Image: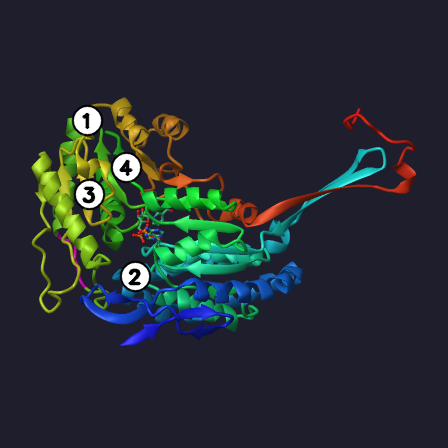
């Protein structure tokens, strides 16, 4: 069995805390590695390395910083298969799906190759008599990222790519469920030419997160994970004087209008609801057909599609999805399905008894489909984060719209319709951050910014795209006047431009 430590100052190092956690292969249920959990000394070693390296990196011209990412993108492509298999072995998702996880992070690295342009400041000539004014965007210094298990490649890259491109040093605290890919991503950055100390990986649990939040030399914290922890991290970051962007859970609805192509809508729901075993923050977990006829026709199409889904270990290239990440999440999902049945929802496809010969200890959950779910039920209110789709029937468009509007989460939402007016009205009124019109998973591409509303996100700047450059830099504004423009005598009143 391997042991995984930390990545500090350009090299893998062992942890010093004596505390560790099991890393599992969810497909088999076997422990595959022991992961060191950081203490204050481990984090301090990372901060010391970051502090020593950051000034020279920030002073490196932006084209040179960009070139590290050019090389990095090439290395990610060269190592795609190896990275995807490593990712699937600890996460459980299919290898093709893991490639998508890496690709979406790679695209953020492509985006930040534009850093010479993205980080340019602003200039006003003649802001007053003989006065010029300019603003620059300087790196925060040391940034930190705390990431969830479900995208162990994409989400670390959402954070460290813009942070590092902008001249920061970075400390990544990945999920303790699947740390191997983040470690490898850091190694490849060194291979791409990043100076050591600029990207460090500190593995750990709550103790490491609290140490990051409290550390006086870390200026900015980005978090993605569940809502209670996102809210906690946001509050603690503020308490310790750090800027923070924190992203939480989701319950993404898809509204199906009576005029939609129901075969297209059903296919979209299958991919978006069950892909990656439903463990995506942009997964569709609630389908809202409008009108009884639409609902009946949709259910009729969904049932055979759900029954035919192939659940298998990541090593099976024909799998639609694999296991969920841990035994604890398997148990939690199964318990919530029981709750749904007790609450009176109709379980049209029951995957609770799913077993896979030869993989009896794997963390599998069979695909489930609920009909006649209502907003008062726990299975509607809570994020299940498993292969479970709930159908909530709505009488008309207004009552369908009211469902995601009233839900505490506001990450993503979709509408399926041929009616441009309905789609336009929906996009204008809905209080959700990312909207798909006939697109089930409307995850913005790297050059736009990603983020939800309501309790899916705390803080005002989103991930990647233009927002990320703002988040990882501070504005400094300089006002200049030279002797020929300076009037004699002291000025006592507030200076204004008349
Ligand atoms: P999680 O909240 O359990 O863990 C996220 C991170 O927080 C991990 O690094 C973990 O070590 C740390 N952590 C866990 N408990 C902590 C505590 N008590 N104090 C401090 N830190 C703690 O989330 P997860 O299970 O890894 O990921 C799934 C969740 O992430 C889902 O809710 C999903 O919707 C959400 N998610 C959201 C987005 C988004 O962009 N909004 C994207 C991906 C995942």
Which of the labelled discs sits on residue 291, or is there none? 1
SS category of the residue bearing label 3: strand
Would you say the residues marked 3 and 4 are in contact, meaning their CB atoms lie under 8 Å apart? no
Circle 1 residues within 10 Å: few <14, some 14–19, many ≥20: some
Viewer-nearest of discs 2 and 3: 2
Q: CA distance from mark 1 to mark 3?
A: 18 Å
Residue linked to disc 3? 389
SS category of the residue bearing label 4: strand
Would residue 449 be seen by someone viewing this image from the given angle?
no
Cβ of disc 2 within 8 Å of ligand 1?
A: yes
User: What's the residue at 92%, 39% (across, down)?
Assistant: 484
SS category of the residue bearing label 2: loop
Q: Which residues are magenta?
A: 308-312
Residue linked to disc 4? 253
Q: Where 358 sits versus 173, above or below?
A: below
Marker count (numbered): 4
Q: CA distance from mark 3 to mark 4?
A: 10 Å
Nearest to N terminus: mark 1 or mark 3 = 1
Nearest to N terminus: mark 1 or mark 2 = 2
Q: Where 242 sits versus 211, above or below?
A: above
Residue linked to disc 2? 177
How does the figure colour the protein chain or chains? rainbow
Q: Where 433 sits versus 385, above or below?
A: above
Would you say the residues marked 1 and 2 are in contact, meaning their CB atoms lie under 8 Å apart? no
Q: CA distance from mark 1 to mark 4?
A: 16 Å
Q: Where residue 433 sits in the image (x, y, percent)?
A: 40, 37
């Amino acid at each position: 069995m391997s042991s995984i430590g930390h990545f500090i100052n350009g090299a893998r190092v062992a942890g010093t805390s004596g505390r560790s956690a099991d890393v599992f292969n969810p497909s088999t249920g076997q422990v595959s590695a022991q992961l060191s959990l950081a203490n204050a000394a481990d984090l301090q070693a990372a901060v010391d390395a970051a502090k020593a390296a950051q000034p020279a990196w920030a002073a490196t011209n932006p084209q040179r910083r960009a070139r590290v990412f050019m090389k990095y993108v090439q290395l990610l492509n060269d190592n795609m298969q190896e990275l995807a298999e490593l990712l699937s072995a600890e996460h459980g998702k299919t290898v093709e799906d893991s490639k998508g996880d890496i690709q979406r992070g790679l695209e953020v690295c492509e985006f930040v190759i534009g850093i010479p342009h993205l980080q340019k400041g602003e200039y006003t000539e003649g802001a007053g008599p003989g006065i010029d004014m300019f603003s620059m965007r300087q790196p925060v210094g040391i940034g930190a990222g705390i990431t969830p298990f479900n995208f162990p490649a994409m989400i670390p890259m959402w954070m460290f790519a813009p942070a590092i491109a902008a001249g920061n040093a970075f400390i990544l605290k990945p999920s303790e469920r699947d740390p191997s890919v983040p470690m490898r991503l850091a190694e490849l950055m060194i291979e791409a030419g990043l100076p050591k100390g600029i990207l460090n990986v500190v593995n750990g649990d709550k103790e490491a997160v609290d140490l990051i939040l409290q550390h006086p030399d870390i200026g900015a914290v980005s978090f993605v994970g569940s809502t209670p922890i996102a809210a906690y991290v946001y509050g603690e970051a503020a308490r310790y004087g750090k800027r923070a962007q924190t992203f939480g859970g989701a319950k993404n609805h898809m509204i199906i209008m009576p005029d939609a192509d129901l075969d297209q809508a059903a296919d979209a729901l299958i991919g978006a609801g069950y892909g990656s075993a439903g463990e995506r923050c942009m997964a569709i977990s609630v389908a809202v057909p409008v009108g009884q006829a639409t609902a009946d026709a949709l259910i009729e199409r969904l049932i055979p599609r759900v029954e035919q889904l192939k659940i298998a270990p990541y090593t099976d290239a024909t799998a639609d999805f694999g296991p969920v990440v841990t035994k604890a999440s398997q148990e939690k999902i199964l318990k919530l399905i029981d709750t749904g049945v007790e609450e009176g929802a109709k379980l049209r496809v029951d995957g609770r008894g799913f077993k896979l010969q030869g993989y009896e200890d794997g963390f599998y959950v069979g695909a489930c489909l609920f009909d006649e779910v209502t907003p008062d039920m726990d299975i509607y209110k809570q994020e299940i984060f498993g292969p479970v789709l709930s159908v909530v029937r709505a009488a008309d468009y207004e009552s369908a719209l009211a469902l995601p509007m009233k839900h505490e989460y506001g990450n993503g939402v979709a509408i399926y319709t041929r009616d441009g007016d309905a789609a336009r009205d929906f996009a204008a009124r809905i209080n959700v951050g990312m909207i798909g019109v006939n697109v089930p998973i409307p995850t913005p591409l790297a050059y736009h910014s990603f983020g939800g509303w309501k309790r899916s996100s705390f803080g005002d700047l989103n991930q990647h795209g233009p927002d990320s450059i703002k988040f990882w830099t501070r504005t400094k504004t300089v006002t200049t006047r030279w002797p020929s423009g300076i009037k004699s005598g002291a000025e006592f009143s507030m200076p204004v431009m008349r």
